[in-house]
Amino acid sequence: MPRRGPTLFTRTVVRRWVKVDHRETSVTVEDAFWAALCQIAAERRVSATSLLTTIDADRHRSNFSSAIRLFVLGHYVDQFRKLREQAPTP
């Protein structure tokens, strides 16, 4: 099937090697999730490595890549909820 117009994301899943809690491991996440993770780290004024260590420590049974995706999703869901709560009611 031919591609129609430009797409938002040009790459799918990318494996990255990261250091978490003084050990090296790999994560496989889409560019969009990785960019969002880096943006969240910058907003919190922490390194991506520090944020990854926190995500790793807080995860329950899911694999690390999934935990990263769920963390990013949860961050933006929380932001959306806060915006809705602050919005004036008509």
Image (spheres, rainbow, N blue to C red):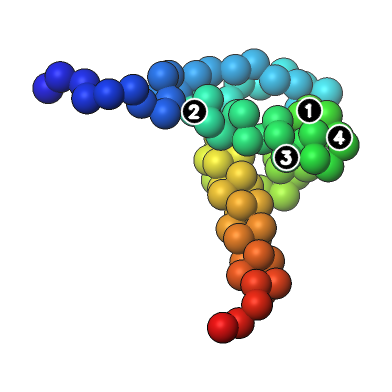
The spot of residue 74 in percent (x, y) is: 61, 54
Q: Earlier in the sequence, mark 4 or mark 2?
A: 2
What label does residue 46 carry, if any?
A: 4
Real-space CA distance between mark 4 and mark 2, rounded to the nearest whole angstrom: 21 Å
Q: How many marks?
A: 4
Mark 1 highlights which residue?
49
Amino acid on which disc 3 is placed: Ile
Amino acid on which disc 2 is placed: Glu
| Rendered residue at 70%/30% (across/down) | 38
Q: Is residue 12 above or below residue 68?
A: above
Q: Secondary structure at mark 2?
A: strand
* Cβ atoms under marks 4 and 2 closer than 8 Å: no
Q: Nearer the viewer, residue 51 or 42?
A: 42
Q: Secondary structure at mark 1?
A: helix
Residue 64 visible in the snapshot: no
Q: Secondary structure at mark 4?
A: loop
Q: Nearer the viewer, residue 1 or 5?
A: 5
Mark 2 highlights which residue?
30
Q: Is residue 78 above or below residue 88?
A: above
| Rendered residue at 68%/66% (across/down) | 82
Q: Earlier in the sequence, mark 1 or mark 2?
A: 2
| Rendered residue at 66%/65% (across/down) | 83
The spot of residue 16 in percent (x, y) is: 60, 17
Real-space CA distance between mark 3 and mark 1, rounded to the nearest whole angstrom: 12 Å
